[in-house]
Amino acid sequence: MVRVYKIPQRKKNIFNGLTINSKIIYLNVILFIIFGILIYIDSKFIDYIAIKPSNILQGQYLWTFFTSMFMHAGLFHIFANMFSLLFIGSLVEKIIGAKRYIYFYLTAGILSGLFFVFISLIFQSNYNVYAVGASGALFGLVGFLMIITPNLPVYIMLIPIPIKMKFAAPGILIALWFISMAGNIPIGNTAHLGGLLTGLVYGLYLKKKYKNKTNYIKKHFS
């Protein structure tokens, strides 16, 4: 007599089938809410979440190089970053694959934080300024695309015409720097620069290692 056994199926959840980039966006939103609640309960929690050069230079709260990537200063901040990440991150993930993408994203974010602290140490300023946001990692993706897809047309801010990535990337960085100085707005420009440099280096590395593939990608997005 033959018996048929049914193999139990795994329960589906909302994360099944999502790309790594989509999961990162969801994680940013979830942690933004959780961290926001913690800081609302007790403002001292910000030291456990955000990068503060004076803390880092004393060897304290070193994990904030990671946690700060998933905290944002407000609704507009997280909306702007996640909206940009939705398009830029999706493209980068398709180019380099999910595994490389997650490592690259996290590395760019952490190195941008290190660069922020390093510049604070060199110029002996902003020791007590907190830094949060996915912008460092995001600029890492932008720097990568600047090398791999330099002629990719993109729209930035309120400019109604597309601009090639090789011009848009430094243009965004300069524009944000000008806005922060003119309006005395606290923007993590040095963290952005650190992320951009990380992306440029990684892009140049892949361009050298996979010359034919990267040339094909460059032509495809020209």
Image: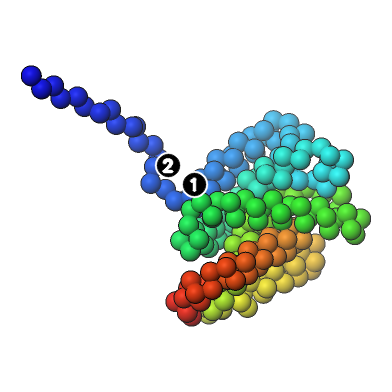
On screen, residue 26 versus residue 51, left or right, reads left
Question: In front here: 175 or 64?
Answer: 64
How many numbered discs?
2
* Location of mark 2 (residue): 15
Q: How far across and how far down the image is residue 154, in percent?
A: 53, 73
Q: Are marks 2 and 1 in contact (CB under 8 Å)?
A: yes
Residue for point 77% across, 56% down: 115
* 4 is higher (above) or lower (below) than 171: above
Inspect the image, locate mark 1, and give the three-letter code of the amino acid beneath it: Lys
Residue 207 locus on image (x, y percent)? 58, 71
Q: Residue drawn 39% across and 42% down?
A: 16
- Decide which of 109, 135 is in the foreground and name it: 109
Residue occupying the point 60% across, 42% down: 32
The quadrant in which the N terminus is found is top left
At numbered mark 1, what does the secondary structure look like: helix, strand or loop? helix
> Which residue is painted at 79% across and 68% down in the image?
182
| Residue type of the residue flagged with mark 2 | Phe
Q: In this view, does 102 lie to the left or right of 35?
A: left
> 175 or 7, which lies in front?
7
- Label 1 sits on residue: 23
Q: Which of the two discs, 2 and 1, labels the residue nearer the N terminus?
A: 2
Badge 2 marks a residue whose secondary structure is: loop
Q: In this view, does 51 lie to the left or right of 109?
A: right
Residue 142: x and y in percent read 60, 66
Q: Position of residue 90 (x, y in %)?
A: 48, 59
